[in-house]
Amino acid sequence: MPENVFRPIKKGKIINNAISATLDNGQILHGWENISITKNLDAIAHGFSMDITDKWRQIGEKWVLKPGAKITIRVGDELFLTGFIDALNSNLSSTSRKVSISGRSLAGDLVDCSTKDKSEFNDISLTQLTRQLIAPFNIKVSAKTSVGDNFTKFSIEQGDTIFDTLERAARLRAVMFISNGAGNIEIVRAGTTKTFSELHQGVNIISGTSAFNNSDRFSEYTVKGQSQGTDSILSGKQASAPVGTAKDNGIARFRPMVIVASGNVDDGKARTRAQWEASVRAAKGASLSIQTQDWRQENGEFWDINELVHVHAGHLGVNDDFLISGLSFTKGLGAGTLTNFTLVRKDAFNPQPVIEKKADPVSILGPLNSVDKTKSGSTGNIGSNTSRRFQTATPE
């Protein structure tokens, strides 16, 4: 067997970062190449793609990898992903063939599919609503945070996917959905737990890019909705006038946005939605992309999304905590084992009445004249849309 084949077990011991894939018939496959596993806070399903070179299969033996097959991916002894193979491609040469598979965790079906049964729910919590919608897909949900009050009334909009529906409900409660290794989903808020390791230029950062874009940010957010009236609660003008507002002081000029909320909202829910919109748009307006060697921190734990990591990168002008909003774990012949981070401001996804300018990463950037331009490739001045990039090392 070639030396580049990754085996999870050697002499009875599990090898760190060795990739194994278990099919629903219990068969375990290894020898994977060009592996990529992605996790993102704004995507309920995790993704994967992997190649395997088929040199040793006996002629006539059926190939076990098929689109639609359930698959469990482990890294060492860590359960990383449970899902389905979406696509399979095969390339033939004179000596072997390479099979490539890609897919998503179980929640991928929630992204694709719609509900065909009940379309309206009364006096129901976000957790209960989620549980009812995902039950036919054999996916479980757990709330890792408070989900707020019950929805008095919640309607499913025709044509929306299940994730569209859940995301719309989550915005009204300022929470998010993420998948765990078993394929089930969790309801969370922006994380406050700090990682064990930090990201340091010249230590463990291979390359990095900072990008700032204010085109989707606004100075004021107003959310308007319609609250269903009853004889004893609201009627007439009162029932049709829920309004919530939020401000982003990181935007100096006048840029208002008005959003009409769907569903049944009151002033409080409209205010939460406005604050959520301001927070998310501010978060997406400033991001860092960092690449490091290995998938693990110094204490042996894997990096994970929704945690705070301290970044010290002088060439990017940052020395602060950032929220890990996305991770891409890759492993390939010649490229080594790499982790690619997508980082956003630490107050991202944390609803606030006012987004303060002093918390804006672009406001604390270091001066460009302190950057070694032979390494950073820095171009232009800092403005509403700008970026910086550097590369310090080449992975082994």
Image (tube, grey):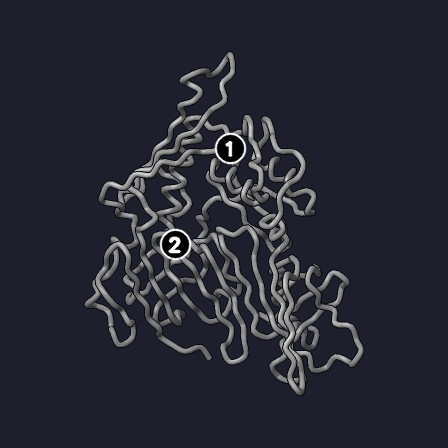
Using the image, tell me which numbered label, if any, was put on residue 211.
none
Q: Give the quadrant of residue 117.
A: top right
Residue for badge 1: 148
> Which image quadrant for residue 372?
bottom left
Q: Total of numbered circles in the picture? A: 2
First-in-chain label (2 vs 1): 1
Is 198 placed above or below 142 here?
A: below
Relative to residue 121, is residue 291 depicted above or below? below
Find residue 344 and name its label.
2
Q: Position of residue 331 (x, y in %)?
A: 54, 72
Please identify the residue farthest to the left as the structure is shown. 369
Q: Residue furthest bottom?
A: 94
Dot 2: element: strand
For the residue pair 81 and 257, the one nearer the viewer reads as 257
Q: Are marks 2 and 1 in contact (CB under 8 Å)?
A: no
Q: Quadrant of the N terminus?
A: bottom right
Q: Please provide percent x and percent y for residue 346.
A: 38, 50
Q: Is residue 229 left or right of residue 71?
A: left
Image position of 68 (left or right of 16):
right
Q: CA distance from mark 2 to mark 1?
A: 25 Å
Residue lying at 33% horizontally and 56% vertically, measured from the top left: 320
At which x and y percent is residue 368?
21, 65
Q: Amino acid at mark 1?
A: Gly
Residue at left 56%, top 31%?
154
